Image (cartoon, rainbow, N blue to C red):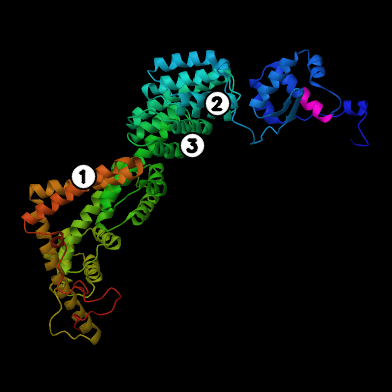
Amino acid sequence: MSFAAFSKDFASNMFTSVENQFITKYLPQADGDAVRVYLYGLYLCQVAGDFDAATCASLLKLSEQRLQDIFSFWEECDLVRILSRRPLFVEYLPVNAAVGRPKTVRPEKYAAFNRELFKILQRAQKDFKPYEMQRILEFLENNPMQQEAFLLVAEYCAKKDGEKLSCGHILNKAAKLVREHKYTYEQVEADLADFHLREKELSRLFTLLGIYRKPQESDYAFPEKWSALGMTEGAVAACAETLGKGSLASLDMLVTELHEKGAVSEKEAREYLARRKEEADIVYKVARKLGVRVQNPRTFCEEYAEKWLERGYDADSLTALAGVAMKLSYGFPEFDAMLEGLYAEGIVDEKSVGDYCAARDRQFRLLQKIQAACGVVKKTPAALDMIETWRGWNFSDAMIAEAAKRAAEAAAPLPYINKLLSEWKREGVMQPADIPARSERAPHGEYKNEAAIAADARSERERFYAARRAKAEARARKAAELAEKDAAFVRADGAVKKGEIELAKAEVFAPSTLPTIRERVEAARRARTAALANLGLTDADFLPRYACTKCSDTGFLPDGKMCDCYRP
């Protein structure tokens, strides 16, 4: 026995510590007497003295048998160990101790609960195995959830799953509520009411997205996330309508995009989505005109289409202007630069754009005539502007064509044409019949220096290569014209192009449809190849077969060096 001890006054001012796990896990399951006995026994452990079970029972106004029964209950819970019953001696264990035998579940404690759970299972035409019922009772023993609250969870799962109801689903749902500290009937009822609303919302979204299954537990995380972002149900539904088909993951990407743009209400969402669709349609139309393949339009929308629409251009005007840009072999960056210049000149409305396109079309036709007469003349904005300048001098197309004929042997045809027309303008010659004889081609005996001779030789070589290239390109055009007259080829080729556009859209808006579309495109490609084979053609026949594959009949290699076929 120790030589020192606390006085009664000192001991009365000490504290008795109770583990939180006892309060959260065991206290809700025990009656008042059991809690009083446990706490008083815990107190006696600290102020141990000559204090027997009879004295304890008397102070707590309990019988000794009742005191023993209560400590037997706590022993079943692994909180105490009874070392002796006569006299009663109890050893307290840590609440989180892993020692002791498994707790037994007292059937009489759950008689009413079992009857109500059985009724729920009968309505669902489901029968749980004994071990499944044991799992449920063990859950109630180890968690502070009320029996009535657990029955509410079971009824909800039965209505939701029907014949597919499982013990695991009920326990998982109940465990989730316990983790959220929802133990009472009222708390669970409020949570399931909100869950029911989310289920209706998900069912509506599933219908819009073409998803033919019941919502799963993991699906409910999406509406909760969207609600936390401040997105209204109408805004989310508008996104689902826009997608048409897809998954909750693809819908989540679109909803997140709207949130980043500040479109959280249904009205804002529909306005943004309409503008988004308009921009995407414009990108695809312009891309088709330019001959550029676009897989994801969003980048092009943000960089180009959004700016074009803000400046007042509409889809028809942009498509018409893209047709002009295509003839100049422009891509998106060059087309955007072209629009910058037109916007600076005030060419934006439908009429001014129409006039510009008509003027450019006339310039292209005249440039084709000049090319036919002179040979190599590049199709550039500078060349078109020069033609417009000549027309500004009041020269007719006939006069310009006449000047082109006279520039056929010139090393630089356009400057030579400009020189002739300038002379004729100064002399007032405006009709082919008025052209003076001295303006005819230079006489053969005229003196030429070495530079002029070299220029003439270069011009001759350019015409030689131009003729070779024209021959190869004409052969390719002939093959294309033959194929375009075949109905089977035209049908299959159209299906391939349409399918490639659908693939590009599906990669952004409906990834789940990609396998089906790819199969359809592959089938169309096979049909296209078969149609070409019937005509005795291949895709290679649509490309010019140049006499020299190194320089493509230009005389110069890509690095600027002379080709082996080039002869000075």
Q: Secondary structure at mark 2?
A: helix
Q: Looking at numbered disc 3 in the image, what kind of residue is underneath it?
A: His
Q: Secondary structure at mark 3?
A: helix
Callouts 3 and 1 close, C-beta under 8 Å: no
Check the image and report above or below for 262 versus 471.
Answer: above
Residue 520 is labelled as: 1
Residue under the image location 69 percent in, 26 percent down:
23
Magenta region includes residue 42: yes
Q: Earlier in the sequence, mark 3 or mark 1?
A: 3
Q: Secondary structure at mark 1?
A: helix
Highlighted range, magenta = 40-46
User: Residue 349: in sight, yes or no?
Assistant: no
Q: Earlier in the sequence, mark 3 or mark 2?
A: 2
- For disc 3, the neighbor class at 10 Å (few under 14, some 14 to 19, many from 20) is some
Relative placement, left or right, of 149 versus 284 is: right
Residue at the disc numbered 2: 138
Residue 146: give x, y in percent of width and height.
Answer: 58, 19
Closer to the observer: label 3 or label 2?
2
Q: Nearer the viewer, residue 479 or 392?
A: 479
Q: Looking at numbered disc 1 in the image, what kind of residue is underneath it?
A: Arg
- For disc 1, the neighbor class at 10 Å (few under 14, some 14 to 19, many from 20) is some
Q: CA distance from mark 3 to mark 2?
A: 45 Å
Check the image and report above or below for 346 versus 39.
Answer: below
Magenta region includes residue 28: no
Residue 262: give x, y in percent of width and height.
Answer: 50, 36
Q: Quadrant of residue 89?
A: top right
Main secondary structure of the magenta stretch: helix
